[in-house]
Image (spheres, rainbow, N blue to C red):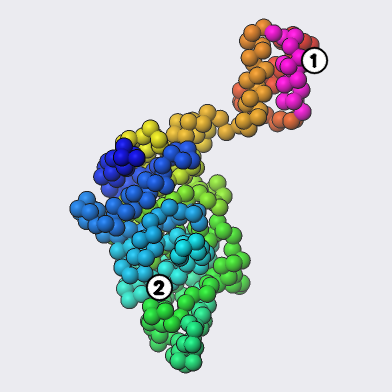
Amino acid sequence: MDVENDKFDHLFADIKIGKVNIITGNNGTGKSRFFKSAAEKAIENTDFYKEHFRQVICLSGTHSDKFPRKIWQLNKSTSGVCYLGYKVGNNMISDIAPFRVIVNALLGENSIAQQSSDAIDFCLARLNIDPEIKLHLRYGKNRKERLIDVAPNELSINLRTLQRDEDTLAIAAALKQGDLSLQTISIKRGNNFYALAELSSGERAYMIALLGALYCAKNGALVFFDEPENSLHPGWQKTILRDFRRALDLNFISATMLVATHSPLIASSISNQEAFTCDFPSGQTWHQSDLYGKTSDNALKDQFSLYSSRSTVVIELTQRCLSYITKGDLSSPELYQAIDTLLSFELIVESGDPMREVMHTLEHLRAHHELP
């Protein structure tokens, strides 16, 4: 364990400032442990952290992130830590929790002056939502009578033209004091409003990422993003990191990102000049990425040591057939049993795929018991 901790300390101390640092590796190789260790180092305000960073932001595509408990606790008490994950206490998970953090920041004292119109427009366009949203709020226990006349439990706001009126100020104060809490948000598309529960998990995850970048991030942030690919369509996996960084750039915010992922689409989505990778468990240092522009199959091979995205059953049967053929054993019943199983799958193999020629050879062998 000391050896692993030494490696983690070295990697964190050598993180590439202002870049996207991408950790890959099989399950159980230490990615989550590294995230936990690095987050702990950051919030301990070590000399290295104080020199390079002004804020810690923790995002997660999974409900079971391994960020240390102190992250959740500091999230409410200091502007230097922003937890946009789903944990709210011991064994407690809340899908609304990250949106509560975003709304508190949105209505915060400095929010209106900080967001550029270009950043807001970009995020709205990428999320395919109108600027008008509705906040649905819930009064705290025994607090409704005291607040109902000064703080309504529903607020419509326009993200492009948000102004500080009496309702906004009253709700912001009540949220800060815990007299009100966010129950849900309704977003508008066209003529219809949709509550968060009506959106897909992928839509909500993308919204947390972009609105988090827009309203929660500060210049000099260190951003942890654990498994951003969860619930995302492959097309969104290719764009989520790029869009997150674009939202920051349009808001004139410089940040360093630390990303743990199992997705070749995530790992290859950032230009080589901006990305550094480390593959666990053997990786000891950051290497400038060479994944940008590669196909998913090549990224799987080069970064994830997975040499084909093809079904493992198809690969194993094909290798078994080729093994018999290489040995010249063309009469083995096991060979033809394997061929029959492969043919029963009725594979549709595209032109240019090497598997196409292999299948033609096996079909000919099955029909004639000799190679073409």
Is residue 69 shown to the viewer in this render?
A: yes
Query: If the image is split into quadrants, where does the C terminus sit?
Result: top right
Q: Which residues are magenta?
A: 329-344
Amino acid on which disc 2 is placed? Asn
Closest to the observer, 133 or 282: 282
Residue under label 2: 104
Q: Position of residue 219 (x, y in %)?
A: 29, 60
- In the image, residue 46 sits, relative to residue 108, either above or below, namely above
Per the image, label 2 sits on a secondary structure element best described as helix
- In the image, residue 222 sits, relative to residue 354, either above or below, namely below
Q: Residue at the location (56% across, 30% down)?
A: 308
Closest to the observer, 94 or 20: 94
Per the image, label 1 sits on a secondary structure element best described as helix
Q: CA distance from mark 1 to mark 2?
A: 70 Å
Q: Position of residue 310 (x, y in %)?
A: 61, 32
User: On the picture, is 372 further left or further right than 175?
Assistant: right
Q: Position of residue 180 (x, y in %)?
A: 46, 80
Residue under label 1: 367
